[in-house]
Image (spheres, grey):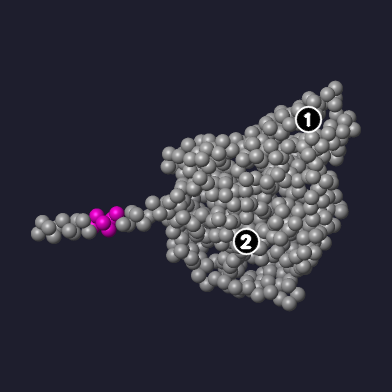
Amino acid sequence: MKAKSTKIALAMLLAVSTAFGAQQELVRGNGAEPQTLDPTLGEGVPGAMIRGDLFEPLMRTDRAGKVVLGQAASYTISKDQKVYTFKIRKDAVWSNGDKVTAGDFEYSFKRAADPKTAAPYSWYIQILGIENGSDIVDGKKAPETMGVKALDDETLQITLTKPIPYFLKGLAHGTMAPIPQKTVKKFGNKWTQPANIVTNGAYQLKEWVVNEKIVLVKSDKYYDNEKVSIDKVTYLPIPEFSTEYNRYKAGEIDVSSSGISSSIYKQMKKEHPEEIHTYAQLGTYYYYLNMKKKPFDDVRVRKALSYAINRNLITEKILGGGQIPAYTFVPDGTDGYIAPKPEYMTWTQKQRDEAAIKLMTEAGITADKPLAFELLYNTSENHKKIALAIASMWKKAFNGAVKVTLKNQEWKTYIAEKKAGNYQVARAGWVGDYNEPSTMLDLLTKGHSSNNSFYDNPEYDKRMNAARTVLDDAKRNALYAEADKLIAQDMPIIPIYNYVTNRLVKPYVKGYPTSNPLDKLKTQFMSVEK
């Protein structure tokens, strides 16, 4: 009897151990506290990763970043390529058990365009070319007139003003995720709180402690949940990467944020090269120049400041993680795009500095009449290092004629100040929303909510409007290149470098992609094998 009891006890212990071993948990560094988890109101990388785990649009991205079917089971396109008809998955379900309907998407799209919502990505409706979308965003027509209609619970029809070659790619963006209408109407702006939120993605929100952690758990209602390995994922908002790195070394973080500092990158490259994962990213790090404030309304000043930045020094010495010096806004190779090579790109840094001094002197700025301004950036070790380096470059190149004061702010305040134009020069970065040049170039069109330089060039807008309707990739990319040349000519922004994604990933984390140009790193594609 004793031997038999021992065997039973061992069997029970093994069963319990196996059960605990099957529980998969992941901790991810997130860089900063997100503004919101509302897909319609969200912007910026800190919230994008989390919202990508919680919500799924009609189309989604796979592990490699390729756009595939999401909440849509299928779609058809009319002969004139202006009417798209989507069939919603029969097994698409909200986390509360309600069916995801075509009406949820209709409500969400109209909510994003409605000026009353004040969605930061309302412009996205405009670039997707949805019928009446632009007029609704501009307050000229009612949201009800939008070319989005639920024909029945499982059929959504979207009508475009004209054919848009990147329309399906664009639908994979988080802004196009459905919103639970009943929940929003019941709880208002508190609908994203853990006790209220309803989601349709692979995960649902369990806990949100501001500036400490956001905890998500696997949704048993997600149609593809059998292929989702991670049961629980915790996001930690840690702005300083040195702090995040210490927690990574202590085993408290499994996947870091993408903001690895140069010193840590070099250290890890020597000690644990297998834990650094790198891939090219469709994105550019740049500085905004507020063209509404003097002397930044003078193209000579803007060009001078751009020319005097030694981009190679920044990418090789300060960052050292494979970043590429940028002289145009759109990264070369974006969806087959060949970026133009502006003349200053071919100069030596000495030639650029000489040209910069000449332009600044012509603008009346000298050591006797110096230019003093603030450089705004959001709190981050890398942003601070780059800002310090560039301020030093400007001081040296212009012999003290340019004096810079650094000003750092937390993410939410930084975003608000930049949008309001309460700055002179500000750090910025943009990672594409879809793999096509317009995802970058649209930002500088007149009236765009992210056009924080307040750039206004009718010729630029003309080229961008013309490119949108061209279905031939080569011809469309040629028009984009013309627009990119105008940016180098007018310099409303200063491109500094093109991103790569560098993360620290523990060896036991499986499924981390080798390529994902939009860096949509979804937890559902990863697993843990300790």
Whether label 1 touches label 2, CB < 8 Å: no
Residue in front for this viewpoint, 391 or 86: 391
Residue on which the image places disc 1: 397
The image quarter in which residue 376 lies? top right
Q: Earlier in the sequence, mark 1 or mark 2?
A: 2
Amino acid at dot 1: Ala
Most distant residue in the bottom direction: 79
The segment highlighted magenta reads 12-17
Label 1: state its secondary structure: helix
Looking at the image, can residue 214 be seen?
no
Residue in front for this viewpoint, 244 or 174: 244
- Residue 180 in percent (x, y) is at 56, 60
Looking at the image, can residue 120 be seen?
yes
Most distant residue in the top direction: 368
* Disc ID at residue 442: none
Badge 1 density bin: few <14, some 14–19, many ≥20, Cα 10 Å = many
- Which residue shows up at 64% across the image and 65% down it? 106
**Vertical relation: 335 (above or below) 373:** below
Residue on which the image places disc 2: 172
- Please state if 54 lies on the left or on the right of 421 as rendered: left
- Please state if 385 lies on the left or on the right of 82 as rendered: left
User: Is 322 part of what is drawn in magenta?
Assistant: no
- Residue 228 in percent (x, y) is at 46, 61
